[in-house]
Image: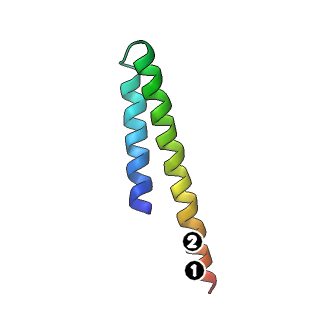
Amino acid sequence: MKITAILLLILGVLGLILSTMMFGDIGIATMVGSLAAILSGFGFFSVNKAIYKQNAVK
């Protein structure tokens, strides 16, 4: 899960950078998609941390 989170964050940051080079609606769509990838990456990190804490308590 941690690998997926890291890949999503890298893809999101790269997409955010590339969206500044695009024109019009395509740039906005790319920016929205990259922000969704960044938020998903942070979500995967938080779920991974919660699962790790839950298993460490047992």
Q: Residue at x 47, y 21 (%)?
A: 28
Q: Are marks 1 and 2 in contact (CB under 8 Å)?
A: yes
Image mark for residue 51: 2
Q: Residue at x 38, y 44 (%)?
A: 10
Place residue 21 in its image quadrant.
Answer: top left
Query: Residue 51 location in percent, x, y?
Result: 57, 71
Q: How is the image coloured?
A: rainbow
Q: CA distance from mark 1 to mark 2?
A: 6 Å
Element carrying mark 2: helix
Location of the N terminus (image quadrant): bottom left
Query: Residue 25 location in percent, x, y?
Result: 44, 16
Element carrying mark 1: helix
Q: Residues within 10 Å of mark 1 (few under 14, many from 20)?
A: few
Amino acid identity at mark 2:
Ile
Q: Residue at x 63, y 83 (%)?
A: 57
Place residue 53 in its image quadrant.
Answer: bottom right
Query: Residue 31 location in percent, x, y?
Result: 46, 28
